[in-house]
Amino acid sequence: MQKEIEKIFVNLIQKSLNLPNNYGLDEDGNEIPCVVIKAQNLKLFNTPKLQITVSTVSSNVYSNRKEYFEQDDKYYERLMLNDQRIIQIDIYSRNNEARERLSEVQMCLASTLAEQLQDKYQFRIGTISNATNLSGLDGGSDINRYTIRFNCLSWSEKINEVDYYNSFRTQARNKNDNIFADFTIQGNEIIEN
């Protein structure tokens, strides 16, 4: 996966629910978000319309490995990470839209577009999601709020060129474990130290 998982879910929800990029600007000139990655300084509830945030609640790494390979007379390391994430989607509105469209958000996770994105970006969405009504959490603010949580398996890869085999220092020892030569191998050359 070479794209943030949260951005993938933002795009999926936005396209599936036919939502705009934003709702314009408020009176202070701040953008009114529609579907966004959850952030600390995000200003929500500044519109009666539907607002959705996406975040990773936790990540459990179950495989972190590397392998080396050669290509065009250069050496590379491939770093690979597999993890299981709990993704959280929060749906808010001051009107009934959050409650009315909750099932649409859940259904988009199993849509054909979701399957295409999973294949393209090499991740998998768990088939069971849990939704919780958190509308009373904000007291008398009259905000409808629903939270959906589900598992997501993701895979990441990074390739770096390494100087692993091109140059290294070594020693030669006799059978008594005494050093009789200290040298550096650089490419096909041996340089005595």
Image (cartoon, rainbow, N blue to C red):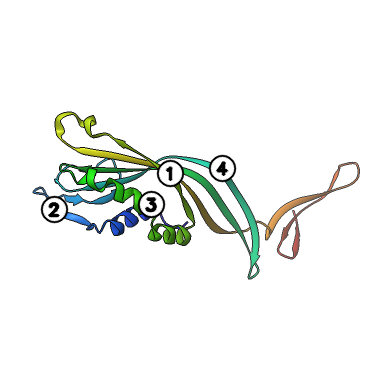
Q: Which residue is mark 4?
A: 62
Q: Which residue is at the front of the view, 4 or 153?
A: 153
Q: Which residue is mark 2?
A: 25
Q: Residues within 10 Å of mark 4 (few under 14, many from 20)?
A: few
CA gap between label 3 and label 1 equals: 10 Å
Element type where label 4 sits in the image? strand
CA gap between label 1 and label 4 equals: 21 Å
The amino acid at mark 2 is Leu
Q: Earlier in the sequence, mark 3 or mark 2?
A: 2
Q: Mark 4 vs mark 2: give the one in front.
A: 4
Q: Earlier in the sequence, mark 3 or mark 4?
A: 4
Q: Residue at x 14, y 45 (%)?
A: 48
Q: Which residue is at the front of the view, 31 or 5?
A: 5
Q: Which residue is mark 1?
A: 128
Q: Earlier in the sequence, mark 4 or mark 2?
A: 2
Q: Residues within 10 Å of mark 2 (few under 14, many from 20)?
A: few
Q: Which residue is mark 3?
A: 109
